[in-house]
Amino acid sequence: MKTIASIVFAGLLVAAALYVQLGGFLIAYGIVPNVVLIAFMAFVARGIRWTPLVAVLLGLLVFVFFYIPFWLPEFVMLAACVALARAVPMRLTGNESADFFILVAAGIVLLHAVPAIFGFSAFSLAASAGDFVYTVCLGAVIWFATIRYGKKSH
């Protein structure tokens, strides 16, 4: 029952993040922060188990495949970044906040660098730097606003 509750909770949070990201509510100077990446990296940094993470990632990929197939390569790359982040040892530095920021920064770099390396997208250093700064700053706001809810209570 706990696993099902984790899947539902994570799925609802990712759905809300996807709605905010695709709705364009946080656009600033043409830059859209990757709110879905922030949500997934927060799950990884707070130690979510594999089962809810994989279930939500697969659900997200199925949704994208049927409703917004144009964005499928980007979301597959996002899923690969999240799986890679989860496969990294649970504690990079031993501090959840530092791990979160390292994972978000690495995720943003991978999401911009890999398509540019393979020639799938034009690489703009200014746009990538703006996205990096905006996403990390928004991630900081979200992380520190929700840090209380990441604490385990017994």
Image (cartoon, helix red, strand yellow):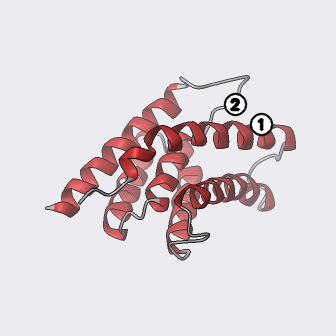
58 relative position to 140: left or right: left
Residue visible at 39% across and 52% down? Answer: 150
**Position in image of residue 132 (x %, y %):** 72, 44
Image quadrant where residue 85 sits: bottom right
Disc 1 marks a residue whose amino acid type is Gly
Q: Say which element carries label 2.
A: loop
In the rendered view, would you say 18 is above or below 51? above
Mark number displayed over residue 55 = none
Q: Are marks 2 and 1 in contact (CB under 8 Å)?
A: yes
In the rendered view, would you say 140 is above or below 98? above
Residue lying at the far left of the rendered structure: 1
Q: Say which element carries label 1.
A: helix
Disc 2: CA contacts within 10 A as few (<14), some (14-19) or many (>=20)? some
61 relative position to 51: left or right: right
Residue visible at 54% across and 77% down? Answer: 89
**Position in image of residue 147 (x %, y %):** 45, 46
Q: Tell me the residue that label 2 is attached to.
A: 31
Quarter of the image that includes the C terminus: bottom left
Disc 2 marks a residue whose amino acid type is Ile
Image quadrant where residue 30 sits: top right
Quarter of the image that includes the N terminus: bottom left
